[in-house]
Image: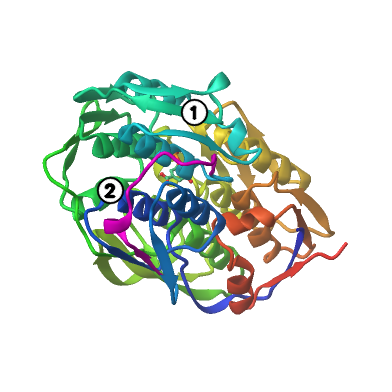
Amino acid sequence: MDIISSKTETLYGEINCPGDKSISQRAVILSGLLNGDLKVKNFLFAADPLSTLNAMRELGLQVTIENEIISIHAKDSLLKSPKMELNLGNSGTGIRLISGLIGGLGLHATLTGDDSLSKRPMKRITKPLSEMGINIFAESNRPPLQFKGAKLQKKFRYHMPVASAQLKSCLLLAAVAGEMELELVEPVVSRNHTELMLQSFGANICSELTENGHYIKYVPERMIETDFIEIVGDFSSAAFFIIAGLITPESDICIKGVGINPSRAKLVEILLDMGAKIELVNSSTVNGEKIADLKVQYSELQSINISPEDVPVIIDEIPILLIAAIFAKGKTTINGAEELRVKESDRLAAMEAGLKALGVQVSSSHDSIDVEGNPNFDLESLTIIDSFGDHRIAMSFLVLGQRVAGDILVKDCNNIQTSYPDFMRDMIKLGGSLEEYAK
Ligand code: S3P
C-alpha cells in the first residue's frame, strides 16, 4: 500500500497513545513463566505483538481475548516444543526474546521471519546463548534459528558488545526460564522494560551504573508472580505526533497516556534542548512504568549534536528526529548510530535516500548522519519516497508531508501495521491529511 501525505494548515486536538510494542511482547512472553493466570490491558494489537502472541500459543500458552483484554491461563499452559516452525514476521524483539525463552527451557524449535527479519544479525544472541549451554544453530548467523535442547550452566556472566535491549532481554529470559544466575554488563543503558517487569513480578533482579557500564544481576530465588498488567502508551509511536506538532505551524496537540520511562523518552529532553514547546501533565506510574500526557505546540527549533551514548535511548526515534532536523536552524549531527544499519531496514541509508530526494542537504558515514537544517524548507511538487518496507521510515516521511506544500507519496507502507495500525486515523483526527494512493 502507498500513502499520499498532503499539507495541512495546522494540527489540533488530542489522541490516545497506542500500547507499547516492546512491553506488549514482554508481557505475553514472560506470562509463559508465571505461576498463575494473568490479564493484560491495553495490549498493542499490531502485527509484531500478534506474531509474538501466536508463537507463544504454538508453544502451549492458553490465551483468550475478550473486549481487547488478553487473558492468559497460565495454570493450563505447559510450554513445550512446538510442532510447527514459529514465524515471528517482521519482529526482531519477537525472535530474539522468544529465543531466550525457548533456549532457557531447553526446547526444540525453529524460528523464522519475513525477508527483512531473515537478513538481521543474530550472532549477538547465538554466541552468548551457546555459551550458556543452549544448542542453537543458525546458518550465517541469520534466521532460521534452530534450537535443539540445552544443558545449562548454573551461572553466567557476560559483557555485552552492544547496548541492545533485545540482547539483554533474550539473556534475562533464558536465565529466568532456565533458573540460572546471570550477571550482565551493557556498555550504556538501553530500554529497561524487562528489568522493570521482572521486578514488578517479584524477581530478584538489580541493576546499577558502574564505570564499566550498566550492571544487571538476576538471581533465581523465587517464582515470578502477577495477575494484571496494564501496558502504557508507546513513546516511539507518540514521537511521530510530537514532531508533527512541532513542525506544523500553529499546531497545539495532546497525546494521552504516553510511556515516559527515562530509557525510552530521552527524545523529549533532546527536543526541549532544541527549543521545543512540550509539556508533561498528569504523570503517574503504571506497573513500574512512568506515564504522562504530552502537550505539544508548534516551535522554532535549533539544531543539535547527538553523542553515541544517547543513541540506544532514542534508537527508534532517530528517523523522525531527522525530520525535525530539516526545520532546525543549523546542522544536526547524530554520531555512533551504526545500529540503525541493522534495523527493519538500513535506516541511515533509507533516511539519507529520502532526504536527498527531497533536496535536503544530508551526508552520512558508516555510523553517523548530518542534516543541514533550514527553518524555511519547503517542497514545490510531488516527491516519491521509498519506505524500504520499514514502518518507521514510512511514518517519518508521512509526518513531513503535513508541513510542506508539495505532496509526498510514500511507497510500500504496509508495515505501519507492525507497530501503529491506527496511525492514519490518528493523524486525520488531529486534522492531518493522509490518503491511501489508488494506482
Ligand atoms: C526493542 C529494542 C530496540 C528497538 C526495537 C525494540 C525491544 O532494539 O530498536 O524496536 O523491544 O527491546 P535493540 O535493543 O536491538 O537496539
- Residue 391: % across, % down: 61, 52
Q: Is residue 425 above or below residue 102?
A: below
Q: Is residue 365 above or below residue 4?
A: above
Q: Which mark is residue 8?
A: none
Q: What amino acid is labelled 1 in the image?
A: Gln
Most foreground residue, 233 or 188? 233
Residue in the image at 25% along x and 51% along y: 196
- Residue 114: % across, % down: 63, 41
Label 2 vs label 1: CA separation? 21 Å
Marked residue nearer the N-terminal end (2 or 1): 2
Query: At numbered mark 2, what does the secondary structure look like: helix, strand or loop?
Result: helix
Query: At numbered mark 1, what does the secondary structure look like: helix, strand or loop?
Result: strand
Task: Tell me where the magenta segment starts and ends, as one range.
Answer: 69-87
* Residue at image mark 1: 146
Q: Does residue 279 appear anywhere in the picture?
A: no
* Residue at image mark 2: 33
Query: Neighbour class for label 1 at 10 Å: few (<14), some, many (≥20)?
Result: some
Dot 2 beta carbon under 8 Å from ligand 1: no
Q: Quadrant of the C terminus?
A: bottom right
Q: Is residue 235 left or right of residue 367?
A: left
Instruction: For the residues labelled 2 and 1, say whether their Cβ atoms are less than 8 Å apart.
Output: no
Question: Magenta includes 86?
Answer: yes
Most foreground residue, 2 or 27? 27
Residue in the image at 54% along x and 65% along y: 241
Quarter of the rendered image showing ligand 1? top left
- Residue 22: % across, % down: 42, 51
